Image (cartoon, grey):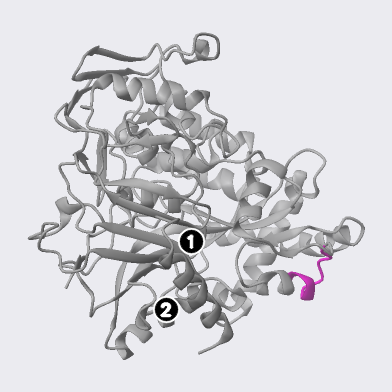
């Protein structure tokens, strides 16, 4: 076993031994488990989980990574959940929608309790969102903005601090009125950042199955919420950051019980190892090369962005293995399109090829331009193979190009904007095509000024108001063409999530993992 694994094992032993870290896994949603055990019958009382990268803040209003969203699903409960593409009740027992899809009325389940024993009310949602919008964001803009900016009267919020379009006329009634029809509001409100919270001192409390007992940058510990109706099966769940390439050794060696790969696959290894098992799911994460198009930057000129997109096409097409050759996840197929094959907005493959390859003639000029204005190309991943390939292809890069920490990569994307190219990734929204708004819309929750392209964001704004479903495909095809022309990022492809776990300690009734609504199947101890 290599030095990397031994070093990681030593770190994990130290972390698990002391009671300063904590986190709950993506596993604690008892509703989806057939024949769920109770706390008293679960034979294993602690669960140790590995994540490949830090998750950032676990406070709903500050959530800005898909990893945090996955963890928060066990702590907080939004109004509704998106389970396998179907909207189901969560903190709301039921809801009604006005004929014009501009007003949504929710019946709140006031029998739910926060971890301090307080009963949930409609007012908790209104207060959580108003207070959350006032907090300094961890990303470029407020994580709550991509839905709440559409509420009626939002333009006065900066002055009043009150969301006029969000009302709680009764303890169990929440009304949300939007300034215009909002077709995908229910899907968007299923995000965990829109959960109700209670702030108690330095703690942010939810109504979910677990409570954040301690939160650090790369490790955390969770305990069950004694007042939740969905009691956690484990008395303690600890999550730490560990390297994905070490996951199989760490799991089978007993250092951790489960590892969330977020793209890295272990199919062959799981078949060979009697103590390892894998849960797999559909596409869950986009892989991209984010291009800094801010004024004065190298990629402020659209012809350069399109030339780079054509270069990536030629690189990935020429190499057997495609993106995997350049350090991307096994199983990732190069796909320059944003939308999945079954989604509205997907273009014919031949049209995409024609549009991208039309700019191959501009690649030589792109290379020449980098000789006087070198590109800063960074990645928070372990592999720098694509950076090396860019140099080999004739692009000149800055001396400080290369690997940075995942935290530094996020800071570059959201705050600093000194890099020209960043290898990035973000969640797949496999339902309504309006999901593109979260990353590319002007008020998107996880957007960055680097990748904002006015033509794209304007089209997405128009799309949000569409009510007639027959209009979706033609409109979002316009969005797809605008993405290929404006190139906010070079889209590399999509990967599926996979969970690797110890089959001698854990079991599940399910074989398929789904990331829809951040809901994952629950393990129980053997």
Residue 58 lies, with reference to residue 37, above or below; the image says above
State which quadrant residue 319 falls in: bottom right
Instruction: Tell which of 205 and 125 is nearer to you.
Output: 205
Left or right, 346 with reference to 168: right
Q: Main secondary structure of the magenta part?
A: loop
State which quadrant residue 396 falls in: bottom right
Residue 122 lies, with reference to residue 365, above or below; the image says above
Q: Residue at x 47, y 31 (%)?
A: 146
Indicate the position of residue 160 as horizontal and vertical percent values: 50, 9
Instruction: Tell which of 80 and 30 is nearer to you.
Output: 30
Magenta-span inclusion, residue 420: no
The part of the chain drawn in magenta is 390-397
Q: Residue at x 34, y 70 (%)?
A: 258
Q: Residue at x 73, y 74 (%)?
A: 388
Indicate the position of residue 427 as horizontal and vertical percent values: 44, 52
Q: Earlier in the sequence, mark 2 or mark 1?
A: 2
Which of the labelled discs sits on residue 454, or is there none?
none
Instruction: Tell which of 130 and 396 is nearer to you.
Output: 130
- Point out the residue furthest to the right here: 372
Q: Which residue is mark 2?
A: 250
Left or right, 26 with reference to 147: left
Q: Which residue is mark 1?
A: 349
Distance from disc 2 to disc 1, alpha carbons, whole Å, reads 41 Å
Viewer can see residue 477: yes
Indicate the position of residue 163 as horizontal and vertical percent values: 42, 15
């Amino acid at each position: 076993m290599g030095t990397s694994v031994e070093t990681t094992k030593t770190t994990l032993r130290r972390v698990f031994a002391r009671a300063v870290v904590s986190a709950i896994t993506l596993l604690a949603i008892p509703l989806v488990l057939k024949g769920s055990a109770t706390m008293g019958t679960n034979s294993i009382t602690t669960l140790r989980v590995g994540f490949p990268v830090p998750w950032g803040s676990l406070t709903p209003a500050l959530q800005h990574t898909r990893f945090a969203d996955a963890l928060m699903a066990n702590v907080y409960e939004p109004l509704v959940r998106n389970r396998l593409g179907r909207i189901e009740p969560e903190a709301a027992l039921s809801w009604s929608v006005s004929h014009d899809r501009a007003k949504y009325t929710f019946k709140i389940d006031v029998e739910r309790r926060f971890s301090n024993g307080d009963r949930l009310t409609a007012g908790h949602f209104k207060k959580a969102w108003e207070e959350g919008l006032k907090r300094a964001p961890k990303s470029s803009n407020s994580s709550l903005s991509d839905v709440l900016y559409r509420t009626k009267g939002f333009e006065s919020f900066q002055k009043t601090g009150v969301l006029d379009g969000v009302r709680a006329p009764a303890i169990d009634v929440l009304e949300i009125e939007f300034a215009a029809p909002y077709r995908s509001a229910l899907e968007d409100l299923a995000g965990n950042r829109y959960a109700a919270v209670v702030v108690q001192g330095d703690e942010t409390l939810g109504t979910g199955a677990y409570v954040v007992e301690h939160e650090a940058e790369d490790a955390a510990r969770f305990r069950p919420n004694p007042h939740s109706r969905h009691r956690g099966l484990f008395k303690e769940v600890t999550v730490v950051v560990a390297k994905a390439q070490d996951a199989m050794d760490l799991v089978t060696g007993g250092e951790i019980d489960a590892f969330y790969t977020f793209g890295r696959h272990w199919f062959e290894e799981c078949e060979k190892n009697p103590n390892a098992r894998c849960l797999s799911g559909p596409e869950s994460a986009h892989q991209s090369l984010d291009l800094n198009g801010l004024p004065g930057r190298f990629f402020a000129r659209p012809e350069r962005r399109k030339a780079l997109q054509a270069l990536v096409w030629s690189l990935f097409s020429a190499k057997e293995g495609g993106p995997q050759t350049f350090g991307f996840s096994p199983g990732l197929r190069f796909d320059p399109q944003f939308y999945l094959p079954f989604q509205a907005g997907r273009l014919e493959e031949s049209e995409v090829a024609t549009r991208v390859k039309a700019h191959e003639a501009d690649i030589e000029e792109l290379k020449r331009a980098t000789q006087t204005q070198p590109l800063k190309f960074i990645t928070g991943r372990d592999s720098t193979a694509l950076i090396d390939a860019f140099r080999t292809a004739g692009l000149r890069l800055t001396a400080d190009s290369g690997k940075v920490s995942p935290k530094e990569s996020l800071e570059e994307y959201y705050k600093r904007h000194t890099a020209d190219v960043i290898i990035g990734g973000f969640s797949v929204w496999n339902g309504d095509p309006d999901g593109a708004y979260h990353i590319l819309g002007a008020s998107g929750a996880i957007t960055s000024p680097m990748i904002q392209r006015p033509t794209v964001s304007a089209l997405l704004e128009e799309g949000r108001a569409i009510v007639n479903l027959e209009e979706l495909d033609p409109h979002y095809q316009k969005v797809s063409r605008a993405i290929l022309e404006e190139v906010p990022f070079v889209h590399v492809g999509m990967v599926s999530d996979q969970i690797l776990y110890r089959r001698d300690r854990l079991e599940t009734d399910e074989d398929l993992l789904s990331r829809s609504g951040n809901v994952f199947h629950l393990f129980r101890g053997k």
